Amino acid sequence: MGAQAAGPLVVGVDSSTQSTKALVVDAVTGAVIARGQAPHTVSGGAGKESDPRQWWQALGEALAQCGDAARQASAVSVGGQQHGLVTLDAAGAPVRPAMLWNDVRPAPQSERLIAERGGAAAWADRVGSVPGPAFTVAKWAWLKANEPASAAATAAVRLPHDYLTERLTGEAVTDRGDASGTSWWASSTESYDAEILAHIGLDPALLPRVALPGEAAGTVHAGHLPLPKGALVAAGTGDNMAAALGLGLRPGRPVLSLGTSGTVYAVSTHRPADPTGTVAGFADARGDWLPLACTLNCTLAVDRVAALLGRDRESVEDGGEVVMLPFLDGERTPNLPGASGLVHGLRHDTTGGQLLQAAYDGAVFTLLQALDRVLDADAAPDAPLLLIGGGARGRAWRETVRRLSGRPVVVPEARELVALGAAAQAAGLLLEEDPAAVARRWETARGAEYEARPRDEAAWERLTATLVDGAPLLRR
Ligand SMILES: Nc1ncnc2c1ncn2[C@@H]1O[C@H](COP(=O)(O)OP(=O)(O)O)[C@@H](O)[C@H]1O
Ligand SMILES: O=C(CO)[C@@H](O)[C@H](O)COP(=O)(O)O
């Protein structure tokens, strides 16, 4: 147990790629009273899949670690990894494992869908995003083409967070934030797009209701989790939208998140529609927008390079001119689903530490390249970057971001911003307040500030040139 509670308790959940994290939080002060975490298994190889039942089990374990505090909660909310395709049969059991956001097998379906419905600009204009392989629409098309029996047996389609919300409440409910990562929810109309659903042969009756911002999904109905029956359950949202809530973000404040995925985003008052597909035009959980770019290769890729080199993740070294594009899983930003890692400029005197630093540089470069596209007129050009996610705890990550961005960086003290954002959503529901205002009251964005350093232009140019010159290899 952590601090003593002064107000009612709320639970915030982050069901992300690698694990479920649960926080019990004082709704008035934001003090974290208890926390728990339990791991998930992700399949290796070409496909990335997880069993949704394991997320539910992990949720139970993480809540159990919170002890009595979870049993006293008045409201709960679940933030979850975006885009995952959860297919359930008529009894609510998974037809097959969920296909995750980082599963690049639907690349051919993504290309076909873009071409069949007027090209990239038409998609961006209509739904807000160009549907790359990450988007749920491409995953459903892959399932129809490759496993028609599984598609035919599907009686309900869910995203990870609303699968868990439904198991908690018995209600089929999602929210605009996570729905905007499907590409069958259109940002231009803020509703499911009947024409796109007809095009991919998905019956709208299989989808959950989209709750309005601030609306409840229901109450806890299942007795088998350590949560009080009847506690309020908020609609929940995608993990990046939850982190935006958790930081109490105002429009124009840039965030860089270093986790299983790398993401850069900012809240915007303008509906995004990037025809290049670099920026996903997500909705946020409140009624604004969340333009975001996401990479597939972030902390796991750099940790893998460190392991290959037999080095601790912090033992980087300056100098040399070696460049690495650590696209171990293919890449989403830039859209190179078939790519693998590329090293250029290796010399006899290149050290292991320099090679590891090159992996950090490559991972951070791809995110920062997308940042300029993410930021719009709402953003001040020199606004400090909020650095979050597991990687934000690492010195090598932080110093790489400072050296390649040329911006000041703030690392919030609060660690679990997705779970905190879900907790703020639950508190907002309970106290009838704006969840972002709740998070600002909790001062979740407070943290150590690091001043801007001049950008390392030479490294930036080497990375840009390697990406351009390496294109034929990366596109294979
Ligand atoms: N102290 C640390 N320094 C650097 N990286 C860290 C540290 N602690 C955790 N990480 C990295 O954070 C990653 C997990 O980040 P997290 O944001 O929790 O993941 P997820 O995106 O699945 O929620 C791990 O893959 C690990 O590489
Ligand atoms: O696909 C995206 C964003 O579009 C990812 O950010 C996922 O939402 C997975 O998040 P993490 O497990 O890294 O938190």
Image (spheres, rainbow, N blue to C red):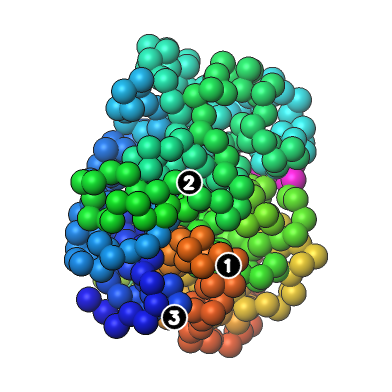
Label 2 or label 1, whichever comes before in sequence order = 2
Q: Which residues are magenta?
A: 273-277
* Badge 1 amino acid: Glu
Identify the mark at residue 433; answer none if there is no mark.
1
Label 3 or label 1, whichever comes before in sequence order = 3
Q: Residue 187 location, x and y as percent?
A: 70, 42
Q: Residue 245 location, x and y as percent?
A: 54, 64
Residue 124 visible, this angle:
no
Residue carrying label 3: 29
SS under mark 3: loop
Q: Is residue 182 above or below residue 90?
A: below
Identify the mark at residue 217; answer none if there is no mark.
2
Residue found at x 73% / y 50%? 272
Residue 152 visible, this angle:
yes
Crowding around mark 2 (Cα neighbors within 10 Å: few <14, some 14 to 19, many 20+) is many
- From the viewer's perspective, tell me whether residue 418 is left or right of residue 58: right
- Quarter residue 9 falls in: bottom left
Give 100 or 209, whichever is nearer the viewer: 209
Give 201 or 129, whichever is nearer the viewer: 201
Mark 1: C-beta under 8 Å from nearest atom of ligand 2:
no
Q: Residue 431 location, x and y as percent?
A: 51, 67
Crowding around mark 3 (Cα neighbors within 10 Å: few <14, some 14 to 19, many 20+) is some
Label 3 or label 2, whichever comes before in sequence order = 3
Residue found at x 72% / y 34%? 123
CA distance separating discs 3 and 2: 24 Å
Residue found at x 69% / y 21%? 195
Q: Is residue 430 magenta?
A: no
* Badge 2 amino acid: Ala
